[in-house]
Amino acid sequence: MSHASTLKIFILHRAARGREATFHDIDRHLDAMDEADYAPARFKEAGGGISIVLNNYLTLYRSTDFKAASDIVYFLLQSVSWLDDHQQEAAPSIPDGVTLYMTNGDIIRLTKVDDDTIAISYDRLNTRIPVTPRSNMFFSDVLVSKQEWVSAAIVALKEYQRILDWIVEEGNAADEATLLLTALSKGIDAMLPSH
């Protein structure tokens, strides 16, 4: 299997009524979250998801089946820490891969193939849910460049962080949700390599 030539990762915001927007578009003022989601407490709990796009047009994976957008943020931070050569000493020991769990039990898994390549797989752990030929959208071992994943993850995290920082700036500094979001932003700063 050949490598994807370009990789883009988007963190998604999911409104309470189900409308989705990428933080890329929100950051560029091409889309917006529901007004209530700009409040720190709502933003902290807002639904979210991830979109992984190959070669500028092929959506490999897109889902908002996660408890919160922060699930995606933590997954991307963990993957950057695990894969980035500058972070190897600081990364926790994750010998065989990084996994993102969906609320329905499906997983996205990253595994190392070699020093320059990772494999992305999407699988169902819950075997009690039947998979029909039409509903089978699972895949295994789609190869991508390790560096391309790290770069795409950092771009997505920085888009998310710009919105996060704006919400923190507008929030009440003593509010619990604002304090938690401030800590998340500082954590993103601490984990991201200087690219």
Image (cartoon, rainbow, N blue to C red):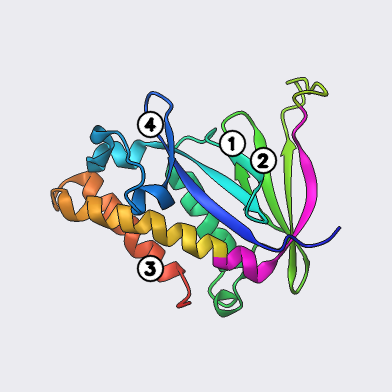
- Report the residue marked by disc 4: 15
Q: Which residues are magenta?
A: 136-151
Report if residue 92 is visible in the image: no
The residues bearing labels 4 and 3 have C-alpha atoms spaced at a distance of 26 Å
In the image, 102 versus 34, the foreground residue is 34
In the image, 55 versus 13, the foreground residue is 55
The residues bearing labels 1 and 4 have C-alpha atoms spaced at a distance of 17 Å
The residues bearing labels 1 and 3 have C-alpha atoms spaced at a distance of 26 Å
CB under 8 Å between callouts 2 and 1? yes
Label number found at residue 102? 1
CB under 8 Å between callouts 4 and 2? no
Question: Which three-letter amino acid code belongs to the residue tagged 1?
Answer: Met
Q: Is residue 55 above or below residue 72?
A: below
- Find numbered disc 3 in the image and state the secondary structure of the residue it sits on: helix
In the image, 126 versus 80, the foreground residue is 80
Q: In the rendering, at what x and y percent does residue 142 appear?
A: 77, 53
Report if residue 123 is visible in the image: yes
Q: In the rendering, at what x and y percent does residue 195 appear?
A: 48, 77
Q: Earlier in the sequence, mark 4 or mark 3?
A: 4
The residues bearing labels 2 and 3 have C-alpha atoms spaced at a distance of 27 Å
- Report the residue marked by disc 3: 189
How many C-alpha atoms fall within 10 Å of the one at disc 3: few (<14), some, or many (≥20)? some
The residues bearing labels 2 and 1 have C-alpha atoms spaced at a distance of 6 Å
- Residue at (32, 49) in percent of width and height: 29
Q: Earlier in the sequence, mark 2 or mark 3?
A: 2
- Report the residue marked by disc 2: 107
How many C-alpha atoms fall within 10 Å of the one at disc 2: few (<14), some, or many (≥20)? some
Label number found at residue 40? none
Q: Is residue 8 above or below residue 38?
A: below
Question: Which three-letter amino acid code belongs to the residue tagged 3?
Answer: Asp
Q: Earlier in the sequence, mark 2 or mark 1?
A: 1
